[in-house]
DNA sequence: ATGGGTCAG
DNA sequence: CTTTCTGACCCAT
């Protein structure tokens, strides 16, 4: 007698992401923020990049400039905070570590999102999603939603559904939802809601009569490949339930590193740039060594504000380095090649350097004519060590090491403490 | 190869 | 007064 056919348990993808991550991370350490409208601002306190649900309800848009919000903040009871990347990075690591206990098959997709490979019956998957949500909330203190589906694209869609429909209570298992309801959802949403489709592609799809997600799901994959790309074809197949985007291994090594920042006040002289480029050169050096990488090419660039119609200048220069290196002295000197291109008196709003053609630091000693005198003496790691012990700005190479001078550094007037990464900023708990 | 275009978070 | 910043990838040239 045949046993009952085992229920097919194809692997599925769980997509987990933290609700308005930056604001939630702030709340985890400052309960007074609970229930209040909170926004976290971009670099230089420029605009709102994360809004708590209460802030969204006030009609505050993503990207809204802080100078427009500030006058009404008091009236609204709005709390604005500068980006505290140290805090967010640490909270993120805790969330990911916790999720890793639910599946060894974990892809950390961004600071606040992860994909996990999971298996089980629909009931088990729903249960698992609920456990993830509860565990992260209880152990790290931030709220997450979970979407579970046969493909990454559908898992992201399920997650979004869970976020926007309280009936799911934060967890949506795609295939547990009746087909008619799924179809209704896909018919009601524009293709722009799909992962990988933004304004440009939406316009092009619309021109072909493809408006809703359902339209796209029913499109011919081959036609889509011919008119768009293999990437868009994968999206179509994934919407149809065929996995095309695998879970990725942790990316080891990068193709490029970029250091770029807008200034809190515009820079107008080559002298100021000399200092900025020195700092970037040293930061690039530190990050390269941390990743065990050396660069062969450095590009330095600067730019005026797009809001400034009078001055338009976007100088850029590329320098082939004499050898693959992470040496701060060499990188800084190369970055300084931009200086002659800086037009005096023009108001520059940002500058940056990019190192490319990266390769792992070899353990083979260079031939003597190519030896690098600074690396030889470990100046890079010495600078890093002192920076770590005495703070940024306490030491630096040449013009990068001077405290004070023109104030081009990032503006962060409303920064919360680094609750979890600095002893003197730990929160105090009082047991009454 | 590489620079422009597009997207994500 | 602003539209983050950083990184990846496709595609046309």
Image (cartoon, coloured by chain):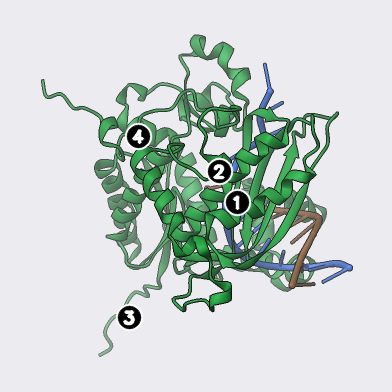
Chain colours: A green, B brown, C blue
| Image position of A275 with respect to A299: above or below | above
In the rendered image, which residue does mark 1 sit on? A332
Report the Cα–Cα distance between label 2 and label 3: 73 Å
Q: Position of residue A4 (x, y in %)?
A: 29, 80
Q: Nearer the viewer, residue A423 or A17?
A: A423
Report the Cα–Cα distance between label 4 and label 2: 30 Å
| Image position of A312 with respect to A315: above or below | above
Crowding at label 4, few (<14), some or many (≥20) Cα neighbours within 10 Å?
some
| Image position of A373 with respect to A133: above or below | below
Q: Quadrant of residue A378?
A: bottom left
In the rendered image, which residue does mark 3 sit on? A5
Chain to which mark 1 belongs: A
Crowding at label 1, few (<14), some or many (≥20) Cα neighbours within 10 Å?
many
Q: Earlier in the sequence, mark 4 or mark 1?
A: 1
In the rendered image, which residue does mark 2 sit on? A398
Q: Quadrant of residue A223?
A: bottom right
Residue at 78 percent across and 45 percent down: it is A340
Q: Earlier in the sequence, mark 2 or mark 1?
A: 1
The count of marks equals 4
Do the residues at pointers 2 and 3 share their chain? yes
Q: Nearer the viewer, mark 3 or mark 4?
A: 4
Q: Position of residue A255 (x, y in %)?
A: 59, 64
In the rendered image, which residue does mark 4 sit on? A418
Q: Earlier in the sequence, mark 2 or mark 3?
A: 3
Q: Position of residue A401 (x, y in %)?
A: 51, 39
Position of A182 compared to A418: left or right? right
Q: Quadrant of residue C8?
A: bottom right
Residue at 38 percent across and 23 percent down: it is A35
């Amino acid at each position: 007698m045949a046993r009952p056919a085992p229920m097919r348990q194809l692997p599925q993808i769980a997509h987990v992401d933290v609700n308005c991550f930056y604001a939630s991370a702030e709340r985890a350490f400052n309960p007074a923020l609970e229930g209040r409208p909170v926004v976290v601002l971009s670099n230089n306190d420029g605009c709102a990049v994360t809004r708590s649900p209460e802030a969204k309800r006030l009609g505050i848009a993503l990207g809204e400039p802080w100078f427009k919000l500030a006058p009404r903040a008091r009236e609204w009871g709005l709390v604005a905070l500068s980006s505290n990347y140290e805090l967010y990075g640490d909270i993120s690591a805790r969330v990911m570590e916790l999720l890793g206990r639910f599946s060894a098959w974990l892809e950390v997709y961004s600071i606040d999102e992860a994909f996990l490979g999971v298996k089980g019956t629909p009931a088990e998957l729903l249960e698992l999603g609920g456990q993830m949500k509860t565990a992260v909330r209880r152990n790290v203190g931030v709220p997450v939603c979970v979407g579970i589906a046969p493909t990454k694209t559908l898992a992201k869609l399920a997650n979004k559904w869970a976020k926007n429909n309280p009936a799911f209570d934060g967890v949506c298992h795609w295939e547990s939802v009746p087909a008619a309801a799924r179809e209704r959802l896909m018919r009601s949403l524009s293709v722009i809601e799909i992962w990988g489709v933004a304004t440009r592609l939406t316009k092009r799809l619309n021109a072909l009569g493809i408006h809703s997600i359902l339209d796209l799901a029913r499109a011919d994959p081959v036609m889509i490949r011919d008119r768009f790309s293999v990437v868009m074809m994968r999206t179509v197949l994934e919407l149809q339930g065929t996995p095309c985007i695998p879970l990725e291994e942790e990316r080891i090594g990068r193709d490029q590193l970029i250091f770029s920042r807008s200034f809190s006040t515009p820079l107008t002289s080559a002298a100021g740039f000399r200092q900025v480029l020195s700092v970037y050169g040293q930061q690039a050096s530190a990050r390269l060594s941390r990743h065990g990488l050396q660069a062969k090419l450095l590009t330095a660039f600067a730019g005026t504000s797009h809001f400034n119609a009078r001055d338009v200048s976007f100088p850029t220069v590329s320098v082939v380095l004499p050898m693959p290196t992470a040496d701060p002295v060499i990188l800084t000197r190369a970055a300084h090649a931009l200086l002659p291109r800086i037009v005096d008196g023009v108001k520059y709003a940002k500058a940056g350097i990019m190192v490319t053609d990266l390769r792992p630091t070899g353990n083979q000693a260079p031939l003597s004519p190519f030896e690098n005198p600074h690396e030889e003496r470990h100046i890079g790691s010495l600078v890093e060590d002192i920076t770590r012990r005495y703070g940024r700005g306490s030491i630096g190479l040449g013009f990068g090491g001077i405290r004070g001078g023109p104030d081009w550094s990032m503006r962060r007037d409303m920064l919360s403490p680094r609750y979890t990464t600095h002893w003197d900023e730990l929160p105090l708990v009082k047991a009454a």
